[in-house]
Image (cartoon, grey):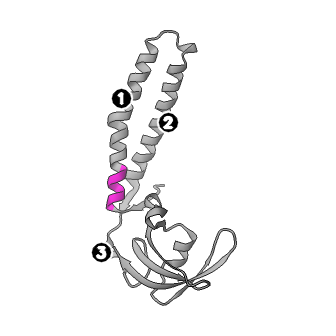
Amino acid sequence: MANIQYVTKEGLDKLRAELDQLESIERPKITQQIAEARDKGDLSENAEYDAAKEAQGLLEMRISKLKDQVANARVIDPSQLDSSKVSILSSVKIKNIANGVEMSYTLVPETEADLSKAKISVNTPIAKGLLGKKVGEIADITLPNGTQMQFEVLDIKLD
């Protein structure tokens, strides 16, 4: 069964660029390393050859995984999303009810999450608790450690 993965257009472009890099640059490099190691003689005790073959195996696994991701990717169309409630690609401003701290996050596909840019995966407990909420609603969220938290949705925007 296909494992459909929702991505943004930028996310899909990034996957394709990495795949192209691996196939057109890294694969020929490793093929060359294997050829050079093979030319050094006895393969049974050739550490360079073994290392290059192992690197080739890892590279081919990564290429295969990327090909699957690209084949099963579905680009999210922001124009089809409802901006009145929290959904994937929403930038949401929330307030922690317990301490009054306000935070803003953008909910993105897992492959595009980057906490340093305030982009959290829709698969995180906080994002799951916020999905479907409207401005003014309270999200009750249970963290993996069992802690209960409440967040009020202050604002929702689609970027």
Q: How many marks?
A: 3
Badge 1 or badge 3: first in the primary sequence: 1
Q: CA distance from mark 1 to mark 3?
A: 41 Å
Magenta range is 9-15
- Front residue of 143 and 9: 143
Q: Count residues near mark 2 (Cα–Cα under 10 Å), then give few for <14, some for 14-19, many for 20+.
A: few
**What's under tag 1, amino acid-wise?**
Pro
Relative to residue 31, is residue 58 drawn left or right?
Answer: right
Measured along the vertical axis of the image, is residue 8 above or below residue 50? below
Q: CA gap, disc 1 to disc 2?
A: 14 Å
Query: Disc number at residue 58?
Result: 2
- Residue 41 is situated, as x and y percent measured from the top left of the image, at 48, 9
Q: Quadrant of residue 59?
A: top left
Which residue is at a point 52% across and 83% down the rendered structure image? 95
Q: How far across and how far down the image is residue 149, in percent?
A: 62, 79
Residue beneath label 3, please? 79
Disc 2 secondary structure class: helix
On the rendered structure, is 86 left or right of 96?
A: left
Amino acid type assigned to the residue bearing label 2 in the image = Leu
Q: Earlier in the sequence, mark 1 or mark 2?
A: 1
